[in-house]
Amino acid sequence: MGGIKFLRTAFVASTALAATMVGARFASAQDAALGPGQVDFTDPAAALSQPEAPIVAMDVRDDLRPRFAAPALTNDGESPRRLELELAAGGGNSPIDVSIAQRATLGADRNGDLDRSGRGAEVRIGQGLVDRRENSENGRAVYMFVASEDEALTWQPGARSEFGGAGSSVALQDRVEVGDVSAGVTYEQNGVQASLAYVEREESTRVGRQNFNQDQSFTGVTVTMRR
């Protein structure tokens, strides 16, 4: 689909831009160091009154919920575990914050067998991406994002016998795989996240020896809360 190709191109471009800006933050910090034979004439008292320099922060979160969950990925097991690692640059008096986030998802069915896995990435550009971590109770952030998600749910009919043992080892596995590419804007405050986004979704389902594919595109509004 043309829309998916455009969003994936935008995602790659946004990732490159974010990586460049984060790298610039590190380079600025290194340039601030004095070289051999140089003398610093900066007044320490004046330096203390200077605006806070932009910082780089890393954050790990496990209280995530997907913005636009796919109905095809629901099962009777426990909620999957979602983990996100985010690297953000900005804060202080920086006019803009930039962050790059990587996500991973793992889930199991009611028998304890691993049946769900996923991965994703997101680039965010806006304000409050760094400061919200220092003030988690009243932290607020507004940002644009481009995200890519891939998640799969697998189950095997007859994998467990009625007595709890393993079923046939040659049973076919049924599988649903959903890939999303989205772009939009998000507002976060006090653990509540409201998003408006355009989503391109590719869904592939395998039942026995048959395969079914479906493409969707939609614009949606969603509100989620941290667990």
Image (spheres, rainbow, N blue to C red):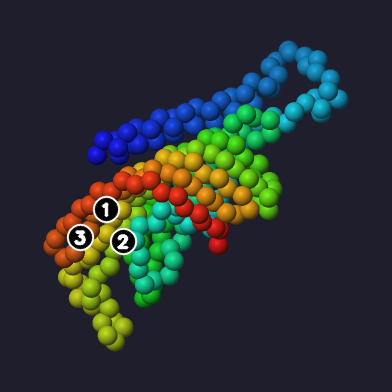
Residue sitting at x 18%, y 67%: 172
Mark sitting earlier along the chain (3/2): 2
Q: Residue at x 68, y 22 (%)?
A: 32
Q: Which residue is mark 3?
A: 206
* Residue at 86%, 25% in the rendered image: 45
Asked if the residues shown at circle 3 and circle 2 are in contact, with their CB atoms under 8 angstroms apart, the answer is: no
Would residue 207 appear left or right of 145 to someone viewing this image?
left
Spot occupied by residue 155 in the image (x, y as percentages of width and height): 28, 67
Q: Which residue is mark 1?
A: 203
Residue 12: x %, y % from top left = 38, 33
Residue under the image location 16 percent in, 65 percent down: 208
Q: Are marks 2 and 1 in contact (CB under 8 Å)?
A: yes
What is the crowding at mark 3: few (fewer than 14 residues within 10 Å), some, or many (at least 20)?
A: some
Percent across and percent down for residue 126 are: 56, 36
SS for dot 1: strand
Task: Determine whether 191 is above or below 164 in the image.
Answer: above
Of callouts 2 and 1, which one flags the residue occurring earlier in the amino acid sequence?
A: 2
Instruction: Quarter of the image for the C terminus: give it.
Output: bottom right
Residue beneath disc 2? 72
Secondary structure at badge 2 equals helix
